Amino acid sequence: MNLKIEELNQVASQVRRDIVRMVHGCQSGHPGGSLGCADFLVALYFHVLQHHTKFNMDGNNEDLFFLSNGHISPVWYSVLARSGYFDASELASFRKLNSRLQGHPTTHEHLPGVRIASGSLGQGMSVAIGAALTKKLNQDDGLVFSLHGDGELQEGQIWEAAMYAPHNKVDNLISTIDVNGQQIDGSTENVLSLGNLRAKWEAFGWDVLTMNGNDMTDVVRVLELAKSKTNKGKPILILMETMMGNGVDFMMHTHKWHGTAPNDEQLAIALTQLHETIGDY
């Protein structure tokens, strides 16, 4: 797929509707970060990623994506369904018994599009590096993308991966950090300050870009720029500034909606702010 900006925005609006309805339906889940990352994942799957919806676990001869901050599964499930990996009607089963759409993505349910179990924060970059190195060994031109939360950078394994990738010239990797400044217990600044992220990643040897993650035009521009910088000796790191809860006014500017489900009244208010564009499931 290679949708235009207006079309991408329409899909993103529908994805945000899916998110709030999914989390409301089971009264559990993480709407805040999911809403903030909707534009990024829609741009990735509907414009940038070279991928096959006829799912193959090996992912040969296509680009791969790994979600490291697995608690934002609602947005990923919605994007996978809307891009054709499985029927959108299955979104109604989110976090319910015997569902393939668990709160954190898993592999034993064999949900198309999911290659690793994620949600134990800090692990996804290591997996993405392994996949990227495998592609190099197989002379596979596909790229590897990963997404991480800024609070996730408080995990030590991230920094081991940050050292490993530049040292081994893993230059077919594009990792993005969702910099929304919020985590479950408050702001990242108050919980454990992350400092100057650009300076840190550049010091580790990454090629660092910045992105407005809630402006579809900028998301597409920076992702295309990142692709142009691959295979030049350095891994690519995108610092993506987003607003947690973006699109629903009462969910923004607070960490409260990191992992809180809307009630019936709140869902109704949220849906009035999010346009139905390609049909609710």
Image (cartoon, helix red, strand yellow):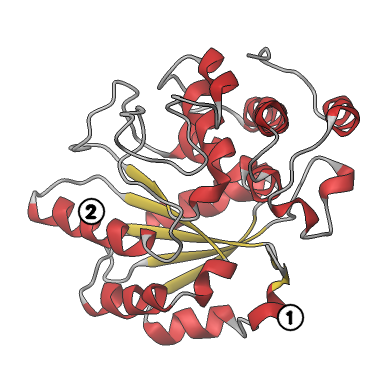
Residue 57 located left or right of residue 272? left
Q: Is residue 15 above or below residue 103?
A: above
Query: Mark 1 — residue?
Result: 190
Residue 122, given in percent of the width and then of the height, sits at: 42, 66
* Residue 137: image location, x then y, percent: 8, 55
The nearer-to-camera label among 2 and 1 is 1
At numbered mark 1, what does the secondary structure look like: helix, strand or loop? Answer: helix
Instruction: Give the Cα distance between marks 2 and 1.
Output: 34 Å
**Front position in the image: 193 or 119:** 119
Q: Position of residue 7 (x, y in %)?
A: 64, 25
Q: Quadrant of residue 120?
A: bottom left
Above or below, comparing residue 27 to residue 257 in the picture: above
Residue 269 shown left or right of residue 112 in the figure: right
Instruction: Please indicate whether residue 88 sits to the left or right of residue 142 in the image.
Output: right
What amino acid is at disc 2?
Ala
Which residue corresponds to the image point at 50% horizontal and 55% vertical from the top-left?
69
The disc placed on residue 131 is 2
Residue drawn at (31%, 57%) of the image: 128
| Residue found at the very far left of the displayed protein | 138
- The one nearer the camera, 264 or 201, is 264
Side (left or right) of 127 relative to 136? right
